[in-house]
């Protein structure tokens, strides 16, 4: 099922991947992808929402700590507040408090926060 990477098949893919290397550095492209993703998050039953498979990368792109926290919360079936009670290392706990500061837009599923 998985093939070992060889110089031959790597060279065959270089033109394709080489053409897309800088696309995530283009701020206008990233904005358009984020707009599409926001729309499909808001309207998941839209007939074209399957296109989100190509836009999902833009959500939480620069939010590694937050994304990890949300994924972990989902995996263990606990709320983010419950996870905070188990952070005994002061540096992690301090960072947790910054990320989950009350009054932010993290609880709003239609917020701009995941795209900042």
Image: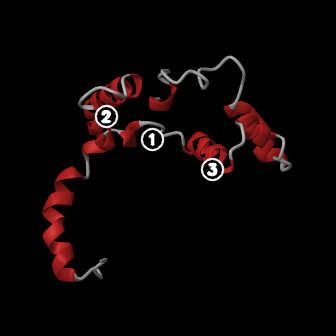
Coordinates of residue 57 in the picture (x, y in percent): 38, 43
Judged from the image, the secondary structure of the residue bearing numbered disc 1 is loop
Indicate left or right for 81 with 114 as reference.
right
Name the residue rendered at 38%, 26% in the picture.
Answer: 38
C-alpha distance separating marks 2 and 3:
28 Å
Q: Residues within 10 Å of mark 2 (few under 14, many from 20)?
A: some
Coordinates of residue 110 in the picture (x, y in percent): 48, 21
Name the residue rendered at 71%, 37% in the picture.
Answer: 80
Residue 24 against residue 115 in the figure, above or below: below
Indicate left or right for 102 with 104 as reference.
right
| Sequence-earlier tag: 2 or 1 | 2
Q: Which mark is residue 61?
A: 1
Q: Is there CB contact under 8 Å for labels 2 and 3?
A: no
Of badges 1 and 3, the one in the foreground is: 3
Count of labels in the image: 3
Please tell me in which quadrant of the rendered image residue 58 appears: top left
Q: Residues within 10 Å of mark 3 (few under 14, many from 20)?
A: few
C-alpha distance separating marks 2 and 1:
10 Å
Q: Residue under circle 2?
A: 30
Residue closest to the far top: 103
Name the residue rendered at 32%, 43% in the picture.
Answer: 53
| Sequence-earlier tag: 2 or 3 | 2
Q: Is there CB contact under 8 Å for labels 2 and 1?
A: yes
Judged from the image, the secondary structure of the residue bearing numbered disc 2 is helix
| Sequence-earlier tag: 1 or 3 | 1
Q: Residue under circle 3?
A: 75
User: Could you say which is closer to the camera, residue 91 or residue 66?
Assistant: 66
Residue 61 against residue 32 in the figure, above or below: below
Q: Quadrant of the N terminus?
A: bottom left
Judged from the image, the secondary structure of the residue bearing numbered disc 3 is helix
């Amino acid at each position: 099922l998985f093939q070992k990477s060889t110089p031959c098949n790597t060279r065959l893919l270089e033109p394709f991947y080489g053409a897309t290397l800088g696309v995530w550095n283009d701020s206008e492209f990233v904005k358009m992808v984020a707009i599409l993703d926001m729309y499909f998050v808001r309207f998941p039953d839209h007939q074209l929402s399957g296109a989100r498979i190509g836009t999902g990368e833009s959500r939480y792109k620069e939010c590694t700590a937050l994304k990890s926290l949300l994924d972990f919360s989902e995996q263990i079936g606990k709320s983010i507040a419950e996870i905070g009670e188990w952070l005994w290392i002061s540096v992690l706990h301090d960072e947790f408090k910054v990320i989950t500061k009350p009054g932010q837009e993290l609880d709003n599923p239609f917020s701009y926060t995941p795209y900042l």
